[in-house]
Each structure stands twice: as structure tokens, then as C-alpha cells.
Amino acid sequence: QVQLVESGGGLVQPGGSLRLSCVATGDIFSMYTMGWYRQAPGKQRDLVATITSASITNYGDSVKGRFAISRDNVKNTVYLQMNSLKPEDTAVYYCRAQRSLGPVTYGPYWGQGTQVTVSS
């Protein structure tokens, strides 16, 4: 079992930046693929970015070139640096953890979410 706690959300003006953090406890963090997803009111939860245990990254099309995901395996933390924020980035942002060991999948585990609001 993995517990995830996000932080760093808030209100920011268009064009601004925020950095989200997600601290994981309960298992070997370095073995997990970590991800950020977001959900706006009335919409489905969408991929923002993922980072594998080998630090291979993947991004949703709408955030490529503006957001960057990274991880610190000593601090058991995954980050999402968000730049050039737009009003359409407004959503609750969730941290996700999952790993596979042969045929066995652990997770996905989700955090409670952190609100990001982009507005002038």
C-alpha cells in the first residue's frame, strides 16, 4: 500500500507558474511509475504527465513544452513544474503511483488531490 499526499496548488494568474509536490510513503518509491492527472468540473480525469522508475517521461498533448515532471527518490517525492499556465489548466490535480512486478500490478494508488486555479 502506498499513501500519496499532494501539495502546492493554489490560485495563479494566467502566464504564471506553480510547482506541485507529491510525497509517497509505504513502499519502495523508486520502483513506481509516478504520474500527475487532472480533473476539471464535469470532465473526465486526464493524463498530465508520468515518469517511470527509469525517469522516462511522458506528457499529455495540452501541456507539452509548458509542464515538467521530475522525481527525487531520496525524498520520495514527485514534482510537477507548471509554467505558462492557462485558464484551461484549472482543475484538481491528482498524484498517482503504480508498479508491476512480473504479472502482479500494485496500484494504482491516488492522492487526495490539490486544486489549481488559473484566473486573473
Image: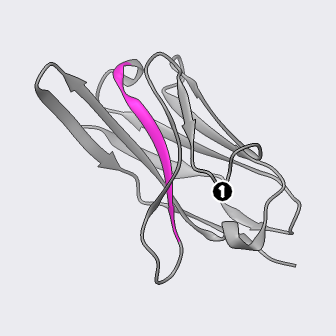
Crowdedness of circle 1 by 10 Å Cα count: few (<14), some, many (20+)? few
At horizontal 53% and vertical 16% (from top left) the residue drawn is 74
Q: Is residue 26 magenta?
A: no
The image quadrant where one finds the N terminus is top left
Give the residue displayed 41% in from the left and 19% down from the top: 30
Residue 118 falls left or right of residue 29: right
Residues in magenta? Answer: 31-39
* Place of residue 33 in the rendered image (x, y in percent of width and height, measured from the top left): 40, 30
> Compared to 90, does 82 lie above or below?
above
In the depicted structure, whether residue 1 falls above or below residue 37: above
The residue that label 1 is drawn on is: 62
Badge 1 element? loop
Q: Main secondary structure of the magenta part?
A: strand
Give coordinates of residue 2: x percent, y percent: 29, 38
On the image, the x and y values in percent for residue 24 come to: 42, 35
Res. 68 image quadrant: top right
The residue positioned 33% from the left and 43% from the top of the image is 3
